[in-house]
Image (cartoon, rainbow, N blue to C red):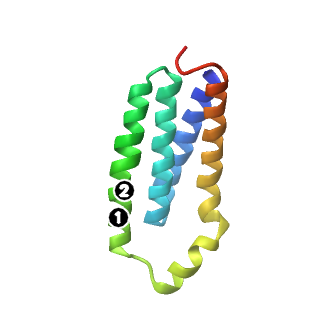
Amino acid sequence: MELAFYVSGLVAVLATIGVITGTSPVHAVVYLIVSLIAVALVFFALGAPFAGALEIIVYAGAIMVLFVFVVMMLNLRSDAERDQSWRNPRHWAGPSLLTLLLLGALAALIGQGGMGR
């Protein structure tokens, strides 16, 4: 349980740094989603599954959909940037690595026999 707590906390801090230092609004929103899911996993590790579920449903689910919708409606990039940016590994490697760390923390939490015991 401690491992899941510390790994989730570290992922939350790193993803939040990614939000703050991100230059693209879309990538900042992706990092923010990873950060909110990491905070939800911290709640699960502390034994508060209801707060963790609310964090995922309300924040990572509903509010982030609105953020992504607004960012996509603004359409701030040029056409040349829009076509090639997703191919650059530096845009998707960070959130993917942090998500894999969260998946490992979740597996450790489940492997220890439950949440908050």
**Any mark on residue 18, and which?**
none
Residue located at (52% from left, 86% from top)? 80
Q: Residues within 10 Å of mark 2 (few under 14, many from 20)?
A: some
Spatial CA distance of label 2 from label 1 is 6 Å
Image quarter in which the N terminus is found? top right
- Classify residue 48 as left or right of residue 116: left
Name the side, left or right, on which 64 lies relative to 93.
Answer: left
Dots 2, 1 in contact, CB < 8 A: yes
At label 2, the amino acid type is: Val
Query: To which residue does mark 2 refer?
Result: 65
Question: Image height check: is 29 above or below 70?
Answer: above
The quadrant of the rendering that contains the C terminus is: top right
Secondary structure beneath dot 2 equals: helix
Taking the image as shown, residue 107 lies to the left or right of residue 64, namely: right
Is residue 67 positioned above or below 49 on the image? below
Could you tell me which secondary element the residue under label 1 belongs to? helix
Q: Is residue 108 left or right of residue 54?
A: right
Residue at screen point 50% across, 53% down: 31
Q: Which residue is mark 1?
A: 69
- Residue 92 in percent (x, y) is at 61, 61
Indicate the position of residue 82 as horizontal and vertical percent values. Answer: 51, 79
> Quadrant location of residue 87?
bottom right
Name the residue rendered at 62%, 53% in the picture: 96
Residue 62 appears at what percent x and percent y? Answer: 34, 49
The residue lying toward the viewer, choosing from 41 and 107, is 107
| Residue 63, horizontal then vertical, whole percent | 33, 50
Query: Residue furthest toward the bottom?
Result: 80
